[in-house]
Image (tube, rainbow, N blue to C red):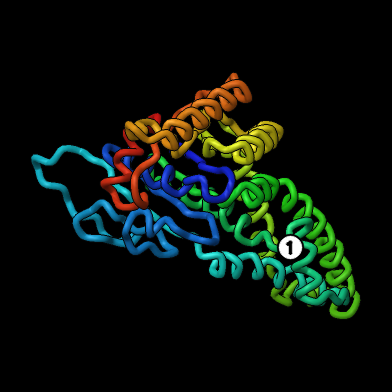
């Protein structure tokens, strides 16, 4: 079974760095996919690689796209993993979402119920008018897990507000789809009755197709499958990333509470950018180190039941596999 690791937290705390480093760590001995669901992608910068909207292997000597033939390993080669990466393209996924809305609108119009595309889209977007990126993330979560191509999938999620909407989506969209399907069923019955009254037995030969209905049901099933994956502690772990700052600690506390309310497993926190080795003769560095130690004590007091992992502050920008390897060494397997 595929394991899923989600990284979330306040914007700018280093989620992408942690996700990329985790993927590199796991890719040494298992097939690993790292996914960016943040509309402001920075995964490609972290890995110093070209990453598109389809999973692409980065660790192989020759970059190949998903579905390409895999070269046969040498006879004496040790089994290894591989690193794959993808940055979700919200535009592509929005087309899938809009196709469902148009299918519903078409059948409602056939029964004489006039709804514009905008009205149907509002029905689908109940409570989340800008939620197409979250819908895409859930849709792709199921697609990538069920593909069975990767042992571990690491998600670099959006900042806290977007992340919370992502975990609300299965419930919100499920209710909207139930309503849509009920309306659609009523419209179908009205339309079928009208055709029967006019055409009699010939109405059965008009080529009425249920393909769209199957699409609606399949879409709802994927959302329910996503919910099952998100709350399964044997498959999924959500790791919260924060920095040693009061605001980040407070926001992380709200995120952990919200995730637990939703039944999402949270086992550890990653406190990033800890100053561990201050320069001698630098009072400002010592003061900063003492402040970080105080914030770490606050984190441990605020989250007594969670494992707290500390990650060092690195000099310069964190990016490229060499610097990510430093972070990877400190990350739990």
Where is 87 relative to 222, above or below?
below
Q: Which residue is at the front of the view, 290 or 129?
A: 290
- x, y percentage for residue 114? 86, 77
State the SS at label 1: loop
Q: Which residue is the extreme one toward the bottom?
A: 198
Front in this rendered view, residue 21 or 203:
21
From where the camera sits, is residue 197 visible? yes
- Compared with 264, 221 (above or below) is below
> Which residue is denoted by mark 1 in the rendering?
129
- Percent coordinates x, y for residue 35 in the rendering: 45, 52
x%, y% of residue 249? 61, 35
Q: Residue at x 78, y 69 (%)?
A: 120
Residue that appears at 64% across and 49% down: 166
Image quadrant where residue 264 sits:
top right
* 190 lies above or below 236: below
Query: Is residue 240 shown left or right of residue 153?
Result: right
- Nearest the eye: 323 or 136: 323
Residue occupying image coordinates x 48% and y 54%: 36
Residue 307, compared with residue 17, is above or below; it is above
């Amino acid at each position: 079974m595929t394991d899923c690791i989600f990284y979330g937290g306040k914007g700018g705390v280093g989620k992408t760095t942690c996700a990329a480093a985790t993927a590199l760590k796991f890719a040494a001995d298992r097939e690993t996919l790292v996914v960016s669901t943040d509309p402001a992608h920075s995964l490609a910068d972290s890995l110093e690689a070209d990453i598109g909207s389809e999973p692409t292997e980065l660790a192989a000597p020759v970059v190949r796209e998903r579905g390409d033939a895999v070269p046969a390993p040498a006879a004496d080669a040790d089994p290894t993993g591989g690193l794959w990466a993808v940055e979700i393209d919200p535009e592509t996924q929005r087309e899938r979402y809009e196709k469902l809305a148009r299918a519903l609108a078409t059948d409602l119009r056939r029964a004489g119920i006039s709804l514009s595309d905008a009205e149907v889209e509002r029905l689908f977007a109940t409570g989340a008018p800008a939620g197409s990126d979250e819908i895409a993330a859930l849709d792709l979560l199921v697609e990538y897990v069920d593909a069975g191509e990767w042992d571990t999938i690491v998600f670099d999620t959006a900042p806290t507000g977007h992340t919370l909407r992502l975990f609300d989506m299965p419930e919100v969209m499920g209710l909207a789809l139930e309503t849509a399907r009920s309306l659609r069923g009523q419209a179908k019955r009205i339309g079928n009755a009208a055709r029967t009254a006019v055409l009699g037995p010939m109405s059965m030969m008009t080529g009425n197709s249920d393909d769209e209905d199957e699409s609606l049901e399949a879409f709802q099933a994927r959302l329910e499958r996503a919910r099952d994956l998100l709350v399964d502690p044997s498959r999924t772990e959500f790791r919260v990333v924060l920095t040693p700052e009061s605001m980040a600690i407070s926001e992380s506390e709200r995120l952990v509470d919200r995730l637990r309310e939703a039944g999402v497993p949270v086992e550890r926190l990653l406190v990033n950018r800890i100053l561990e080795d201050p320069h001698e003769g630098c009072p400002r560095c010592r003061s900063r180190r003492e402040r970080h130690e105080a914030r770490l004590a606050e984190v441990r007091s605020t989250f007594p039941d969670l494992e707290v992992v500390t990650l060092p502050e690195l000099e310069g920008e964190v990016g490229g596999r060499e610097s990510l390897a430093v972070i990877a060494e400190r990350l739990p397997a």
